Image (cartoon, rainbow, N blue to C red):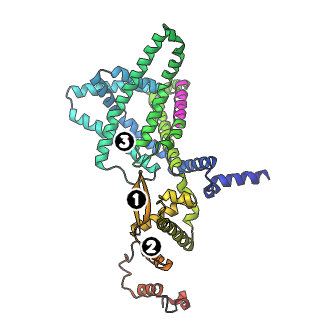
Amino acid sequence: MYVRRVMRIYSYCAEGVWRDQRDLWYIKLLKIANLSVRSFFDKNIQRLASSLTYFTLLALVPALTLMLAIARGFGLQNILKRELYVILPSQVDMLENSFGFVDRFLDSMTKGVLVGISVVFLLWTLVTLLKKIESAFNRVWNINKGRSFFRMATDYTAIMLVLPVLLLASGGASIFLSKAVQSMLDSPLGLLSPFVHFMIDLIPFGLTVLFLIGLNVLFPNTKVRLRYALLPVFVCALVFSLLQYLFVNGQLFVTKYNAIYGGFSFIPLFLIWVYFSWTICIACAVMIFSAQNFYRFNYAEEIKVASQRYRDELTLLIVSIVVSRFEKGEPALSKLGLAKEYKLPVRMVSHVVDKMVDGGLFSVICEDDDYLFQPSKNLAKLTVNEFMKEYREIGGSNFIAELEGSDLMNDVRQLLKDSKVGTEEIKLGEVIK
């Protein structure tokens, strides 16, 4: 009895929940969790994280070079270094070694030694890393088309220039707050100093939240709604902070690595940290995608195996709803609006509406960053048979050149076209003689 109940609960959570159309928060949360877990494994997140780890290692020195070069222009390189130490307390050894490489790299550039090659390599590695990040996030969002060259040039340049400025601003804010605490200790406002200390301690967490929001809003080549990103970003920022804590306090393992790798012991630890960090970032993208698109997966498995008869019935229902609303003067609806209002699967609505638009039977209205649909001609005067005949003609046909003009194809086409010559009496075995 207990086992059967557990199996029923598991079956509902794994499959039955997608047939539940109730608009309840816990059902939505269950759908988001279900889709997040499925997407995490279906999209091979581990391989994406491994690929980004490699390109991060390749672009590490060029990225730090760019940030420190910008900071040097303002005379604020020490603030930037201190801020990086605050953000990455578990990677002190890596940062110290990397800063040494960066200083030598900048010195070689200022002395004119292979300046052109150095700049090209710097930009190439950074752009390659940014393209790989975009590709990974587009895969999570099921987007096949990346940014255009113009958008890559503008967006990537903005990212590379804005990030150092944000880190410098954060470093300046933390210094300001630290001085404010010191002044408070000797003033009547000394009671507020613990609160200010707490706010300073939250700066790394706040930067992590901003980083995850920027990563998930800027990189996917689609519109990511911020309201769906807030909770996943907060959860993943907590997980990232826990990862930092474990690495900072797990220094007992460092002595074991020192015995094996010597002065390079920071490298395997850094690679492990980067891998888990990218896994958290991509998992965050998966959760945001699930929160924003879970409704698209209602009846997804059933639609795949739906009969042609049932597809025709749903098609007629969806088109009739749009035509009826237009005739009554009711406002046009989006695909999601139609699905929610009439309890229809979004995937089926999208398929029918897109096909009607392609056939010129529906027109699109852009309103408040949303797309609404209405008839583009007087469909209300068509009979059901006339409409279904016109609907079935939408799309490509006669594209197999080898079959066109053949007697076999002409016979089959005539049988389907002419329903008044007794086709109901022709047996399937008699079609090809």
Residue closest to the eye, 118 or 382: 382
Q: Which residue is mark 2?
A: 379
How far apart marks 2 and 1 lie (CA) works out to 18 Å
* Secondary structure state at the residue bearing disc 2: helix
Residue 285: percent from the left, percent from the top? Answer: 48, 44
Q: Which residue is mark 3?
A: 130
Give the mark toward the camera: 3 or 1: 1
Between 12 and 84, the residue placed more toward the observer is 12
Q: Is residue 77 above or below residue 48?
A: above
343, 123: nearer the viewer: 343
Indicate the secondary structure of the residue bearing disc 1.
strand
**Principal secondary structure, stretch drawn in magenta:** helix
**Residue type (three-letter) at the residue carrying disc 1:** Ile
Q: CA distance from mark 2 to mark 3?
A: 48 Å
- Frontmost residue, 9 versus 178: 178
Residue 293 is situated, as x and y percent measured from the top left of the image, at 51, 51
Q: Which residues are magenta?
A: 236-250
Q: Which residue is mark 1?
A: 365
